[in-house]
Image (cartoon, rainbow, N blue to C red):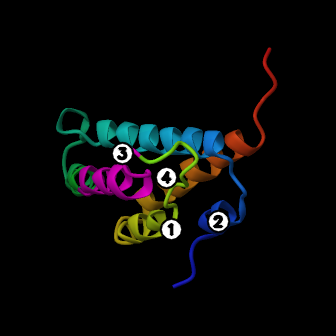
Amino acid sequence: MNPPSELKRLYQADLNPDQQERLFESMAKTFARAIENRAPKNRPPGKAGLKAEKGYYRLLYLEGELLDKVRPAEGMSPASTYHWDHLESIVGQMKDLPELQTEILAALESALDAVLHPSPPA
């Protein structure tokens, strides 16, 4: 399977440790926000609610994967690189939920743009 273009772009980016940390934090916030949006109290009724429920539980699991496998292990030096290759597996596990996969990939693209091309301070 070929990785989506957003992941190819990430793999080609030469991110320094600070940029990697900022990108990771942004992705962790994206997962947390997506989980909150699909939480039981926020679900719509009917079929849409059932789909949101499936996405909710999948996101809980995948957020754990993101935190455990992408971030360098505890105690590693700050210069350690993140394991972005695991992100491809995480996104691949969303293929039966295409709207969720699209949401996460769009957030990755946006976060990567923000890290690579930060806005000047006002």
The residue carrying pointer 2 sits among few (fewer than 14), some (14 to 19) or many (20 or more) residues within 10 Å by Cα, namely few
The reply to whether the magenta stretch includes residue 50 is no
Q: Amino acid at mark 3?
A: Glu
**Residue assigned mark 1:** 85
Q: Which mark is residue 11?
A: 2
Q: Amino acid at mark 2?
A: Tyr
Please say if 67 is above or below 122. Answer: below
Q: Position of residue 20 (x, y in %)?
A: 59, 46
Mark 4–mark 2 Cα distance, whole angstroms, equals 19 Å
- Labelled pair 1, 2 in contact (Cβ < 8 Å): yes
Mark 2–mark 3 Cα distance, whole angstroms, equals 23 Å
Dot placed on the residue nearer the N-terminal end, 4 or 2: 2
- Labelled pair 1, 3 in contact (Cβ < 8 Å): no
Camera-side residue: 80 or 15? Answer: 80
The residue carrying pointer 4 sits among few (fewer than 14), some (14 to 19) or many (20 or more) residues within 10 Å by Cα, namely some
Along the horizontal axis of the image, is 83 left or right of 9?
Answer: left
Mark 1–mark 2 Cα distance, whole angstroms, equals 8 Å
Dot placed on the residue nearer the N-terminal end, 1 or 2: 2
Secondary structure mostly seen in the magenta stretch: helix
**Residue assigned mark 4:** 103
**Region rendered in magenta:** 58-75
Camera-side residue: 87 or 38? Answer: 87
Q: Amino acid at mark 4?
A: Glu
Dot placed on the residue nearer the N-terminal end, 3 or 4: 3
Q: Residue at x 55, y 55 (%)?
A: 81
